[in-house]
């Protein structure tokens, strides 16, 4: 397929849409994910009274957050000792002198030595206090010989007395553990996406782990290609609600539509906020002929064309660090490929090799790496997810032969990706770590696609 087609063909082909040596792969992945992971033991938390009925939600959430963080290797629960401490007072140092010390109860070496062989241990218990759930949690470095030195932190958490409150408390405890490792928790971040589960393709939002899925638009049309402002207050998207594809702007604070002037064109699509939140990039046929990249104010005024070419160019994404360059999908060399250029239209560079179709570019928050979908090495239409170091142009393939994988977007932590895939039969939203592991399905009802991951 070439890009010498109508915008309708491009919407279907472009917008819908052999690995390197291991040494290269590991180098890129280590930059994003890190090297060897420490082992953490996460025993199930017990609670007193009414709080116990919500511990399944707590334990599942805590374990999933830490497992999916990509920071730890999870010690198998089947290897845990029978005596599990719930608070610091439960630890009992061995009596006597080595090598004939006498065990007196739970101790750090129960967890640091085989078969658990952990580096870290979570300890805690929950209860009811003033009709609220209260959780007392601690993190230990079990490689230490002294209990005081082993304790990395202890904290009290409060939540509502229901499953939602238990999940919230677990998210907060996990976030504090990740912070100790110098990493960012995804708790509080949102994934926006499009879904046809109501019979129409509308914009939806959910928590980073797939919980609390909510419908945002009710236009009873086809709406997709979402962008969220950096401050999380505005949502821009393309919709056919008024006939031809136009851009709509919504306030995420009030749920109301905001004024936006659409240029007279057969296509206005693919909105993208600049990092300062003051302007919008989009793809449009406003200049006549093929779709091109334009920039405008938040209300649609102040239109400016970015770059000059006769080829179709769509999917502009602004570097979140520099704010001065974009990646995009362009047909300058024939089939769709990922290009980079300055925001003033200069220094146009093709990043992908020209093989197959390369689409859906997305910047990592570090401004150095991108993710994209590519048919390289596969039959046309069979997309997989790749990541690339933009400076060196070295790339790594993350998905392999598991359906059609498209629309990768980075999480705020720069370590995870959300993407759409039909690997389960229907197209759904999935997440994974930036090394292709920890793959997790988030949606199941209807057809779900085009995710955008926002920190707000």
Image: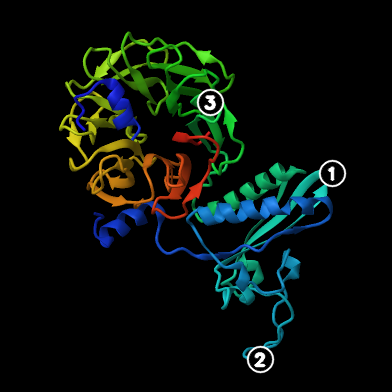
| Name of the residue lying farthest toward the left | 333
Q: Is residue 277 left or right of residue 12?
A: right
Q: Quadrant of the N terminus?
A: top left
Q: Return the mark for residue 294.
A: none
Closer to us: 30 or 255:
255
Residue 394 position (above or below residue 91): above
Nearer-N-terminus badge (1/2): 2
Which residue, given by chain and number where applicable, does mark 2 sit on?
100
Counting from the top left corner in percent of width and height, residue 443 is at 53, 40
Residue at 32 percent across and 29 percent down: it is: 12
Asked if the residue under mark 3 is in contact with the one under mark 1, i.e. CB atoms within 8 Å, the reply is no
Q: CA distance from mark 1 to mark 3?
A: 45 Å
Q: Nearer the viewer, mark 1 or mark 2?
A: 1
**Real-space Cα separation, disc 2 to disc 3, in angstroms:** 71 Å
Pick whichever, 219 or 350, lies toward us: 219
Q: Dot 1: few (<14), some (14–19), or many (≥20) neighbours within 10 Å? A: few
Count of numbered circles in the view: 3
Residue at x 29% of width, y 36% of height: 359
Which residue bears the numbered disc 3? 199
- Where disc 1 sits, the SS reads loop
Instruction: Please name the residue that numbered disc 1 is placed on.
Output: 130
Question: Quarter-wise, where is residue 161 in the image?
Answer: top right
Residue 414 % position (x, y): 42, 45
In the rendered structure, are the residues bearing label 2 and label 3 in contact, judged by CB atoms less than 8 Å apart?
no
From the viewer's perspective, is 58 left or right of 115? right
Instruction: Give the CA distance from mark 1 to mark 2.
Output: 47 Å
């Amino acid at each position: 397929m070439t890009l010498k087609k109508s915008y309708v063909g491009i919407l279907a082909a472009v917008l819908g849409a052999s690995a390197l040596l291991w040494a290269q792969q590991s180098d890129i992945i280590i930059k994003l994910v890190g090297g060897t992971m420490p082992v953490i033991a996460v025993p199930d938390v017990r609670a007193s009274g009414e709080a116990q009925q919500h511990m399944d939600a707590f334990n599942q959430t805590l374990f999933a957050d830490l497992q999916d963080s990509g920071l730890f290797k999870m010690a198998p629960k089947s290897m845990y000792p029978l005596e599990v401490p719930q608070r610091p007072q439960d630890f009992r140092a061995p009596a006597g002198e080595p090598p004939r010390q006498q065990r007196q109860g739970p101790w750090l070496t129960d967890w640091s030595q085989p078969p658990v062989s952990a580096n870290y241990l979570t300890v805690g218990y929950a209860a009811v206090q003033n009709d609220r759930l209260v959780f007392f949690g601690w993190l230990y470095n079990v490689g230490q010989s002294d209990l005081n030195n082993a304790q990395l932190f202890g904290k009290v958490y409060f939540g509502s007395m229901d499953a939602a409150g238990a999940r919230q408390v677990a998210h907060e405890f996990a976030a504090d553990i990740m912070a100790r490792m110098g990493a960012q928790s995804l708790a509080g971040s949102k994934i926006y996406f499009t879904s046809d589960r109501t019979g129409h393709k509308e914009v939806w939002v959910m928590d980073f782990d797939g919980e609390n899925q909510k419908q945002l638009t009710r236009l009873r049309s086809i709406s997709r290609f979402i962008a969220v402002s950096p401050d999380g207050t505005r949502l821009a998207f393309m919709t056919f609600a008024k006939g031809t594809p136009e851009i709509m702007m919504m306030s995420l604070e009030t749920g109301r539509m905001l004024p936006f002037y659409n240029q007279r064109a057969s296509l206005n699509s693919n909105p993208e906020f600049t990092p300062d939140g003051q302007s919008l990039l989009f793809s449009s046929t406003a200049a006549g002929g093929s779709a091109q990249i334009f920039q405008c104010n938040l209300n649609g005024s102040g239109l400016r064309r970015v770059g000059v070419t006769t080829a179709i160019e769509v999917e502009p994404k602004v570097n979140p660090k520099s704010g001065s360059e974009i990646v995009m999908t362009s047909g300058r060399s024939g089939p769709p490929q990922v290009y980079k250029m300055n925001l003033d239209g200069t220094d146009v560079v093709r990043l992908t090799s020209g093989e197959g179709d390369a689409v859906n570019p997305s910047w990592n928050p570090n401004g150095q790496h991108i993710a994209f979908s590519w048919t390289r090495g596969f039959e046309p239409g069979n997309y997989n997810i790749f990541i690339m170091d933009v400076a060196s142009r070295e790339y790594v393939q993350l998905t392999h032969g598991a359906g059609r994988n498209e629309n990768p977007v980075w999480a705020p932590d720069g370590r995870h990706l959300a993407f759409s895939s039909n690997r389960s039969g229907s197209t759904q939203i999935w997440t994974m770590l930036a090394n292709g592991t920890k793959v997790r399905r988030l949606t199941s009802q209807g057809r779900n696609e085009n995710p955008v991951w926002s920190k707000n």
